[in-house]
């Protein structure tokens, strides 16, 4: 229970997943007082909490780590930064040991060696342990407290955030010396498991104070899911064959470009799958590794190893994709004084280039970038002796609403309009310039609606949803602008009208802006290997 709706702290962490909790832990260990605010319940909300995931855990053997880095080069379009890869691999290795020793995570034990198996975690247990760990260290957690806008002082430094405490029915403000955005990515409210809180809120807040984004064209990730389900565990479909409604094999669906085959087929007919490439041993391991994946089948009376089941594709956006808030240095600074970003909220190009990190690289990025941001934010807030601004102002400009006014356009109607341009595979996955341009124009119209002064007014729930809709729309506009600027096929961004890789476009595409969206390219040189990009965007 909070006695005063205005709190004061050294470091404010916005988010409640792995990046947020690791950031809070490292900020606290570096001497800072820390408040963490989560839209949901820290430990249960977000994409990690309801699922198991691999982790990019590689022992400190030079050959093994070189191989791990090399495996990302070609899929990622040679955009990854080896300095970042080295730092993330090392911090992930150390953090996974800390998770077992200090975080009390119960790793399974390899019966052959007697050593803990640290190459993956079960999300529910992982996040339960992370919540308990940060609480033991003295981090103050405000659950069910979505942040709605950042606070800035008279010099433009980020000085906290304001939001709404759902269970107490009142607004709150947290003044802070530094703020870390670890709000997750944006899955456009597609219903993919755990992504209901991943609506791009941090991206919108960052843009409102002048931050920009990188790699947003690599935000068109789609996961395979049983029809009507929310569970996208695409790795398991490596053991599947795919079929047409008449029972014939859907040729090419199980290949490296199989999702494109599935997407094109779904435009005209149903697609079915069966995990018939898994033997009995693998099937048992799969059930043990991801029990929630099989729960959906058990409830329907389906044996996915012997029975056909219909599949669909669910958009996962920047949660599984790569784009996010750009980082200016190895401390995860955003370029805006006092503001840091970590996890899915930040660009993952640094270690994945232009290709999804799947589960393992995403998990490593979350814990490593959270660690970097947490330590740096603590030093920033304490070293400069900046703790609070006397009267920081709210930086929110879009759909921030006023409770006393009646609501204007209903957020649900505007959300449906935005999703019509973001979710269909023929627009966002099977990409071409004409279709993306049409979607971009449609989102511009949606942006006009969310920019209406009455949009977001009304009750508290309406204000929260209005900000989510505005954030989703903003992320979509940055995504399409970046994808149109990259006139080639690289990484995840494949274009029908530009099917080839263009060596001259090896650099990064930067984007930003709210009412007017801009894009800018970086030079295709070894600058992509440099730690940080400040010099390249000046």
Image (cartoon, rainbow, N blue to C red):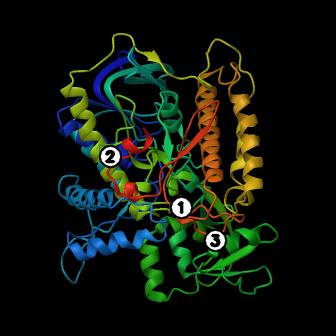
Location of residue 428 by image quarter: bottom right
How far from the left and from the top, in percent, is residue 100? Answer: 22, 59
| Residue under the image location 62 percent in, 65 percent down | 225
Q: Nearer the viewer, residue 528 or 400?
A: 528
Task: Return the x and y of residue 406 as percentages of the image width and height.
Answer: 71, 16
The answer to whether residue 125 of the structure is visible from this angle is: no
Comes first in the chain, label 3 or label 2 = 3
In what quadrant of the picture does the N terminus appear?
Answer: top left
Which numbered disc flags the more N-terminal residue, 2 or 1? 2
- Asked if 404 appears above or below 121 in the picture, the reply is above
Secondary structure, mark 1, is helix
The x and y percentages for residue 115 are: 19, 74
Q: Secondary structure at mark 3?
A: helix
- Mark 1 surroundings within 10 Å by alpha-carbon count, few (fewer than 14), some (14 through 19), many (20 or more): few
Q: Which residue is tagged 2?
A: 370
Q: Quadrant of residue 126?
A: bottom left
Q: Which mark is residue 259?
A: 3
The label nearer to you, 1 versus 3, is 1
Residue 482's x, y, as percent? 60, 49
């Amino acid at each position: 229970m909070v006695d005063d709706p205005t709190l004061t702290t050294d470091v404010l962490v916005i988010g409640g997943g792995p990046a947020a909790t690791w950031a809070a832990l490292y900020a606290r260990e570096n001497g800072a007082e820390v408040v963490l605010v989560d839209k949901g319940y820290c430990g249960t909300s977000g994409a990690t909490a309801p699922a198991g995931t691999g982790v990019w855990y590689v022992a400190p053997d030079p050959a093994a780590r070189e191989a791990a880095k090399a495996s990302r080069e070609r899929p990622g379009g040679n955009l990854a930064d080896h300095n970042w890869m080295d730092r993330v691999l090392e911090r992930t290795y150390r953090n996974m040991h800390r998770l077992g020793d200090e975080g009390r995570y119960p790793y399974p034990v390899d019966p052959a060696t007697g050593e803990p198996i640290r190459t993956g975690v079960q999300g529910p247990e992982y996040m339960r342990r992370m919540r308990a760990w940060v609480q033991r260290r003295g981090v103050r957690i405000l659950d069910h407290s979505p942040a709605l806008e950042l606070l800035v002082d008279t010099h433009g430094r980020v000085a906290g955030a304001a939001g709404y405490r759902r269970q107490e029915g009142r607004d709150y403000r947290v003044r802070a010396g530094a703020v870390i955005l670890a709000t997750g990515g944006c899955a456009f409210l597609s219903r993919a498991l755990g992504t209901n809180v991943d609506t791009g809120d941090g991206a919108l807040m960052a843009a409102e104070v002048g931050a920009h984004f990188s790699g947003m064209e690599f935000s068109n990730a789609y996961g395979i899911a049983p029809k009507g389900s929310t569970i996208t565990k695409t790795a398991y479909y490596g053991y599947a064959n795919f079929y047409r409604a008449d029972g014939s094999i859907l040729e090419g669906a199980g290949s490296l470009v199989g999702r494109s085959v599935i997407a094109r087929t779904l435009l005209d007919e149903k697609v079915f799958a069966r995990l018939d490439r898994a033997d009995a041993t693998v099937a048992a391991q799969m059930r043990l590794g991801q029990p929630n994946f099989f729960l959906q089948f058990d409830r329907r009376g389906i044996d996915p190893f012997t029975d056909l089941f219909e599949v669909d594709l669910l958009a996962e956006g920047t949660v599984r994709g790569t784009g996010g808030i750009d980082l200016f240095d190895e401390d995860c600074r955003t370029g805006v004084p006092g503001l840091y970003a970590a996890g899915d909220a930040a660009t993952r190009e640094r270690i994945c280039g232009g290709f999804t990190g799947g589960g393992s690289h995403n998990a490593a990025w979350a814990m490593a970038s959270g660690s970097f941001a947490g330590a740096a934010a603590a030093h920033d807030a304490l070293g400069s002796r900046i703790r609070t601004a006397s009267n920081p102002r709210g930086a929110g400009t879009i759909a921030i609403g006023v409770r006393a006014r009646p609501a204007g356009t209903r957020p649900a109607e505007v959300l449906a309009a935005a999703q019509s341009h973001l979710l269909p595979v023929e627009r966002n996955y099977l990409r071409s310039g004409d279709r993306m341009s049409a979607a971009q124009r449609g989102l511009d119209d949606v942006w006009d609606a969310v920019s209406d002064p009455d949009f977001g007014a009304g009750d508290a729930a309406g204000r929260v949803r209005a900000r989510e809709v505005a954030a989703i729309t903003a992320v979509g506009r940055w995504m399409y602008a970046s994808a149109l600027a990259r006139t080639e096929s690289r990484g995840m961004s494949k274009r029908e009208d530009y099917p080839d890789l263009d060596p001259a476009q090896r650099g990064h595409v930067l984007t930003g802006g709210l009412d007017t969206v801009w894009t800018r390219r970086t030079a295709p040189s070894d600058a992509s290997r440099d730690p940080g990009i400040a010099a390249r965007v000046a």
